[in-house]
Image (cartoon, rainbow, N blue to C red):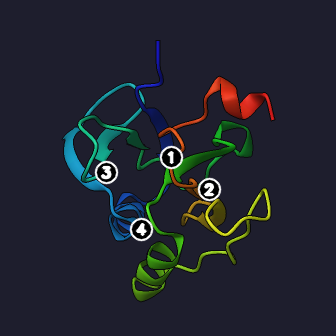
Amino acid sequence: MRTLHFGLRVTDLERSLAFYTAIGYQVLGSVPETAFGSLTMLQLPDDDFVTIELVHDPSRTELDPDSRLNHFVIQVESMEATVAALAANGIDAEEPVSPNDSDDFLTSWVTDPDGNRIELVQWPAGHADGITAADMAN
């Protein structure tokens, strides 16, 4: 089993689409009417699959803090290039830090228009494309 995608509630679909496309996501398609509201499917350019589903109910102008996501993680190739590209698109990223005090394992955070936190991760060279059991042993 593996995670397919997650549904993220948003209050202003156009504002959220502007944010997520500025990060680098692309719209794959949408489902206009569901029990939850409209669904907009997003994927990163190098991914084969949808990873975010923006859930928008126009009648909900505020989000219940209990219905939000804690955070999600995006892997980046170069933290420096990513932070610069985000800044060029008007998105402020927190100063990158290294969880293990190295120069090649970096994390940073951005916050979307609805207050959802997104962690950016630059893995060290040779690291798997996700968290593995080897990471848990450290």
Mark-to-mark CA distance, 1 and 2: 20 Å
For this rendering, which residue is in front, 52 or 66? 52
In the figure, 30 relative to 133: above or below? below
| SS category of the residue bearing label 4 | helix
Residue type, numbered disc 2: Glu
Residue type, numbered disc 1: Gly
Residue 111 lies left or right of residue 98; in this view the side is: left
Residue 20 lies left or right of residue 79; in this view the side is: left
Residue 55 lies left or right of residue 126; in this view the side is: left
Mark-to-mark CA distance, 3 and 4: 13 Å
Judging by the rendered image, the residue that carries numbered circle 4 is 19
Circle nearer the N terminus (3, 2): 3
Mark-to-mark CA distance, 2 and 4: 15 Å
Locate the C terminus by quadrant.
Answer: top right
Report the residue that reaches farthest toward the front: 126
Judging by the rendered image, the residue that carries numbered circle 2 is 119
Residue 44's disc is 3
Is label 3 in contact with label 1 (beta carbons under 8 Å)?
A: no
| SS category of the residue bearing label 1 | loop
Count residues near mark 1 (Cα–Cα under 10 Å), then give few for <14, some for 14-19, many for 20+: few
Count residues near mark 4 (Cα–Cα under 10 Å), then give few for <14, some for 14-19, many for 20+: some
In the figure, 112 relative to 28: above or below? below
For this rendering, which residue is in front, 53 or 64? 53
Judging by the rendered image, the residue that carries numbered circle 1 is 126
Circle nearer the N terminus (1, 2): 2
Circle nearer the N terminus (3, 4): 4
| SS category of the residue bearing label 2 | strand
Q: Residue at image x 56%, y 53%?
A: 123
Mark-to-mark CA distance, 3 and 1: 21 Å
Is label 2 in contact with label 4 (beta carbons under 8 Å)?
A: no
Circle nearer the N terminus (4, 1): 4
